Amino acid sequence: MAVVVAAAVLVGVFVMKPQMEQSSEPVSLENWEDYYHEEIPLTKVPWYILNRYAELATALPEHGEPKPDDRLELPVDVHYYTSPNASGEPAYTIPKGTVVSLFVGGDRYLTYTQMGYGYCCFPDYQAGWRYGIPFVTEGSPETASDWADEQPKYYVQTSELEAVAQAFWEANQNSPEIQAATENLGGEEEFVHWLVRLPDQQIEDGGYFDAPDYP
């Protein structure tokens, strides 16, 4: 059973506004399960296909008050790239200290529509990298599928998302839901590791791909 929160993105004077990714046309395969098997670049995988890999995500039942906070100040800069390579300038940066809204549609429980967003990005074939929708900078991200379809998608380093997940745990460790998940997973470190890698778990459990950052 899983809890999750997907993080939302902030707005700040120094935030570079994301641009729609200029990637090549999506690849069309006869069998949707083959995209990860064939290691098709994630920029070429249709977004609805990536979400299909994670449709089995579940949520932990409510455990009372207080609920996890839906706002968080970023503990680090979060950089987004058009390829899994940090040697050049990022396409989009959300600076440390920006206050973000954490949950898709205000929902504090994970559903598959949150997969691929915030710190629940999809695993890349290269260790240390993930791919998905950046944290939202204004308001809350929406649950509507067409909202996700229209958002720019980027590569982001796993370590930066782990720093955000760690800050989330520290800010919400007294929430009964977070306490239950932490105990179920075996501790703080395990919770942070799992929170960022839930898509990896779903994809690996389905037999589609052995993500390099998981377990």
Image: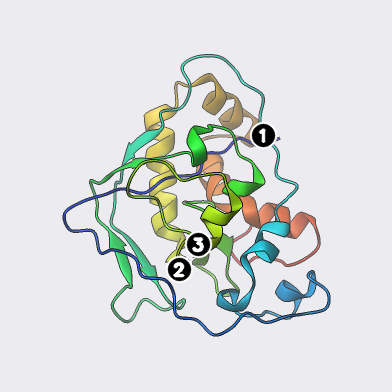
Q: Which mark is residue 150?
A: 3
Which residue, as the protein is rendered here, is positioned at the far bottom? Answer: 24
- Rendered residue at 42%/76% (across/down): 82
**Element type where label 2 sits in the image:** strand
Establish if 13 lies above or below 21: above
Residue 121 seen in the figure:
no
Q: Earlier in the sequence, mark 1 or mark 3?
A: 1
Report the residue marked by disc 1.
59
Which residue, as the protein is rendered here, is positioned at the far left? Answer: 13
Establish if 16 lies above or below 65: below
- Rendered residue at 54%/85% (across/down): 24
Quarter of the image that includes the C terminus: bottom right
Residue in front for this viewpoint, 144 or 83 = 144
Crowd around label 1: few <14 · some 14–19 · many ≥20 (10 Å): some
- Distance Cα–Cα, label 1 vs label 3: 26 Å
- Name the amino acid, label 3: Glu
Foreground tag (2 vs 3): 3
- Distance Cα–Cα, label 2 vs label 3: 13 Å
Report the residue marked by disc 2.
154
Location of residue 105 in the rendering, given as x and y in whole percent from the top left corner: 50, 38
- Distance Cα–Cα, label 1 vs label 2: 26 Å
Q: Earlier in the sequence, mark 1 or mark 2?
A: 1
Location of residue 56 in the rendering, given as x and y in whole percent from the top left corner: 75, 47
- Name the amino acid, label 2: Tyr
Q: Is residue 54 left or right of residue 93?
A: right
